[in-house]
Image (tube, rainbow, N blue to C red):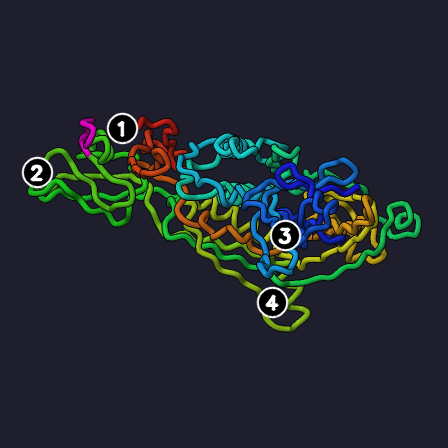
Amino acid sequence: MIQVYINNEEVVSNKEFTIHEELLNTSSTILNNCYPKTWETTKDYVSNFYYPNDYSNCEIYNGGNLIFAGVVKNSAEISLRPTEPKYCSLQILDYKTLLSEGQTLDYVIPEGTIEDAIDSVISAISSYGFQKGNIVLTNGTDIMAAYSTLDKTPYDVFQYIAEISGSKWFTRMIDKTHTAIDFYSPELMNNAQDIEYNTTYFENNNIVDISFSYGTRDYRNKQVITSDEVFNDIDTIEALRADGSQNTYELLQKVATIKSIYVNGIKQTIGTATDKENGVYADFYYSFGTNQIESNIVFPANTLITITYTSLIKGRQVVVNQDEIDRISTLIERNGTIARYETRNDTSSNKALAKIADSYIKFKGTPEINLTITTQDNDLFEVGQQAYFNAPIDELKTNYMVKSKDIQITKTGNDGIVFYTYILTSNFDAEKAINFFDNQRRKRAGNIGEDEYITRNIDINSRALIIFDTLTTEEIIPVGDNTLNAPLNAPFIE
């Protein structure tokens, strides 16, 4: 029995509708000619009006099992002609839409493991009904640099974490009020049963059809990622001479952090501009992102000042799949390089840039083979699973990831015929299209540097917006390519 409820009221609609589920995009369905089931008693479709408020909750059940839960998002035009029926057509989005539409984040994820970062974001959005699901990562203990979530949506941050960890993330409905966030390394995704190419498999699984296609819509075998500013992997050492008249000195490059300063061989104390403002004494002060340092005194002329520091430089990472370049070159008898270029300013780490570039090549660096499998009344796969195809031709024999799933329902009285259509991809590329609400905010500045301020926005009584500059980094000792810790619970000044 197919049952649809909006705001706990049972409604009916056209006999056919489809629930579309995807890995990254928000799952959705369209209910055409929708109206309360109680109208079936009076058959008065003209005098009554039905138009549920936007963000009304919607639940769809099949045989008593919840198969979809979300919110009313949009309606088609509703006729006001006196003789026309007053029902409506509705677009329903699942609760994943709240990851892009809900409140943006405005705190700093401190330097820590990938899994800690995921936990932090999920904790921040728990009031929306999201909770930690399966976090199955080969590199979950890898360290992620301190990251500012200011003005980024949870969707943005989850996508960034997935890119630098080479993982896949998706949502999973638990019940009508709770949604799980799952992260998997591709090789650790749940395995569904193998797909076989024989009559027995088709009959036992009610297979209507299996077809395949291949494409190079987003293919590349060379990926170039650039960034305006990243931490230099090699420390810079500069030797300056005081002129006896000034106490500020210009360096050749912008400063990320200063490791040491020596004056005529004697080690000096170092502080940031914030330390100076707070009354902390140091022999030298500097500000993140500038090329100037300031001493507390004016040194005599020709005094030798030696500075060792980590600089900020333009970043550029290039990753290639040489086997693919050679393959295409052989086929076309000319240069086989297919390149993509992208600027990413959401990280200050060369290591993170390299991981993003490597992730692009890993998932978009081979031609994408798509399997389309349709079954009748047999839910064979879940989005986010992987399955091996024991295919009749060698080119198709590989693992595939379930990228999307359509549930096409045709109601017949109280019952229904259900067709499931799955799209599986060989290169595990999760993107079918850019998420409608994802405006690439994650590609703006994300990693924070020493002595940087992170503006925090506080809503007061839903009417006033007060901005506090209270979050700063605390330490001045970098670890590898990573930026420095920033306090999460900085005090608010009222």
**Residue 300 bears which disc, if any?**
2
Quarter of the figure that contains the N terminus? top right
| Mark closest to the chain's N terminus, 4 or 1 | 4
402 relative to 272 in the view: left or right: right
Asked whether the beta carbons under mark 3 and mark 4 sit within 8 Å of each other, the answer is: no
| Mark closest to the chain's N terminus, 3 or 4 | 3
59 relative to 349 in the view: left or right: right
| Mark closest to the chain's N terminus, 2 or 1 | 2
Number of numbered discs visible in the structure rendering: 4
Check disc 3 and report the residue beneath it: 47
Q: Position of residue 465 (x, y in %)?
A: 32, 39
Mark 2 or 1, closer to the camera: 1
Dot 2: what SS?
loop
Q: Position of residue 254 (x, y in %)?
A: 28, 47
> Please, is residue 280 above or below residue 452 in the view?
above
Determine if the magenta segment contains residue 109.
Answer: no
Dot 3: what SS?
loop
Alpha carbons under labels 4 and 1: distance apart: 59 Å
**Residue 336 bears which disc, if any?**
4
The residue positioned 69% from the left and 51% from the top of the image is 44
Q: Residues within 10 Å of mark 1 (few under 14, many from 20)?
A: few
